[in-house]
Image (cartoon, grey):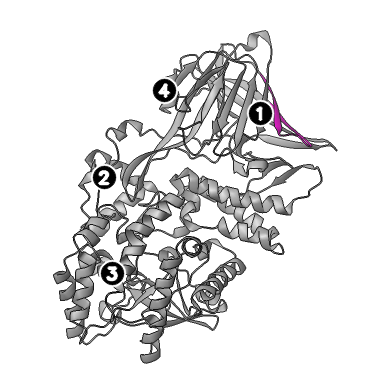
Amino acid sequence: MDFILEEAYKKAYKPFFEIMDEFSDIKINLHFSGYLLSWLHQNKPDYINLLKRLIEKGRIEIVSGGMYEPILSFLPEDDGISQITMHMDYAESIFGNRPKGMWLAERVYEPYMPKTINKAGILYTIVDDNHFKSVGVTDEDLYGYFITEYEGNKLSIFPGLEFLRYAIPFKPIEEIDAYFRGIEEKGMDLAVFGDDGEKFGLWPGTYDHVYTKGWLRKFFEYLQENKAWLKTTTFSEYMSDKPPKGRIYLNCNSYKEMGEWCLPACMSGRYEASINCAEENYRDFLKGGYFKYFLIKYDESNDMHKKMLDVTQRAKRHAEARNHVFMGQSNDSYWHGVFGGLYLPHLRASVYEHLIEAEKLLEPKRPFVEGILKDINMDGHDEVILNNNDLKACFLLKEGGVLYELDYKPSSVNIMATLQRRYEGYHDKIKAAVSADSADGTKTIHDMVIAKEEGLDKYLHYDWYRRASFIDHVMGKDVVFDGFYRSSYLEPGDFVKEPYSAAIEKEKNYVKLSMGREGRFRKDGQDAPLSIKKDIILNKGEDTIFAEYIIEGKVNVPFCLGIEFNFSFLGSGGDRYVDIEGERLPLTTQGVLKPSGSAIFHDPYQHVDILLEIDDPLAIWTHPVEVISLSESGFERNYQSTMFMPVWDIDLSKGPKRILIKLHISKA
């Protein structure tokens, strides 16, 4: 978002180098993610010229990385190499020098990576001291760099020091000075600090601390005054002057906080407690989770990841499509920790936008329609794809035969890119949260507990199923809306998370998916057979999904059937609304609406109108799906989607119940 980039530029990127320019002996190593670098190159020519001047004086070494800041372990090797070389080429075209090193996104390291990085032409990278300590390297050996290899492909690795990461720019300079003097007394000669530039002005409270109160200027003055024994240097300069300390082989790792975040939510708090209470001599033996567990922890992340892997395999010989895939590999969208990440709808939407753009470039231009049975998610169960020129609909057979992805291609948007309400370990801290204005810039975002609004705990509801559409709820007559909203009720039917059978009928002008489940209805300890069959039809040349339901069985009591839909609109305000019989309602409307045979959802920002036509429901239940997540600014409530569920009164003593539904998408 331009306004966020502009704010970061004004508060962090620009003032940092304006102050640095005044201190002629200060040298740094600088990495920009590819998208940020391109934005600066296009919008801030004076700033780029300042950096060029500092580079020409030998005061800055540009450090490369993946062009769109991917986690390498999420990518095929070819994509990783291409992203790195793309960034190197672009940096060289701007600054004239070809980078020799790279920033490893989130310092997520796996043992095979030296091969990928070496093949891209990179000589060195930086990870955390945590990586080294976990394989037995002592503190005394962290002040230098090491050589590693994979299948004979060499890579130099520098350990970044955790103390400096937490101290700069948060601790008093006297405390940092004592740390440096302690290193000097031990005869060590290199201390590496590598971290986010945004902590110099953009993180909560840091602009006032770093610039208004002058921390950065004082720090540079301190460095300049002590240059007789304390020098700043670049990585390449140091490597040309000093040999490596020896060989090293590192395991799968990242920084300590990431080890907590990628654990299951029920374990993350226990890990944090273990780290905090362990004696210092034993902390290095405590290892957290594995980064790729995010793909288990969040099905929605896995959905994006597996779609990306599928598209990138098909895009290998199409340069434009491949670049869209690379943009869809930006790492922040796939995981969540103290930053919003996966919980931010616009990040997920951006991934889908670029992956859909790539798919459009790869698909036939002639009218087509197809149905595919394939294990897309790589979980051992087949999913179903219905696809034509306008729509791509993906159904999850193993959990209720639900529609979990619906791509509207004219607008390049997945209108079901929503997120389930989940328990996160940090939810236990919400009642202790303080107001956001208490941030004074002297604490890192890992140490602060801030809430953007009061009463967030009342929104802590957890779903027992994933948010999708065509979710079949078989409910007793006693279920009330409030219990459904809070996800604190029991269903006598067994359809929501259970497998559906599937058959695909392919014809010249349409494809039909027939799904069904022979389930049960439990009442007073007794089971009665109940079946749901739903046929989904997609025609060639149409942007409409037709669904026909047939419910039958030997249930001898009336019950309710709700068919749940979830539509993701990135946000709930502005000009977005749902129109029911001429009445425009906010997307955050919560409660039971009067029955209606149709509803229109309007989202001009994603350029989507959704028309849902439904057969004679008894009522309509709706509520916003909101999660409480953590960002660098504190705890916040995030809108994910609008849940919209027509409800029918079912009495099978009168025979089977038939329901027709039409879902039509058009460009707003």
In three-dimensional space, the C-alpha distance between marks 4 and 2, rounded to whole angstroms, equals 30 Å
In three-dimensional space, the C-alpha distance between marks 3 and 4, rounded to whole angstroms, equals 57 Å
Q: Are marks 3 and 4 in contact (CB under 8 Å)?
A: no
Q: Mark 2 highlights which residue?
A: 450
Q: Mark 1 highlights which residue?
A: 663
Callout 4: 10 Å neighbours few (<14), some, many (20+)?
few
Give the number of the mark in front: 3 or 4.
Answer: 3
Q: Mark 3 highlights which residue?
A: 19
Earlier in the chain: of badge 4 and badge 1, it is: 4
Give the number of the mark in front: 3 or 1.
Answer: 3
Provide residue 268's location: percent of width, then percent of height.
Answer: 34, 51
Q: Are marks 1 and 2 in contact (CB under 8 Å)?
A: no
In three-dimensional space, the C-alpha distance between marks 3 and 2, rounded to whole angstroms, equals 30 Å
Q: Is residue 86 left or right of residue 346?
A: right
Tag 4: amino acid? Gly
Image: magenta residue range: 534-551
Callout 2: 10 Å neighbours few (<14), some, many (20+)?
many
Task: Depth check: give the residue in front, 606 or 643.
Answer: 606
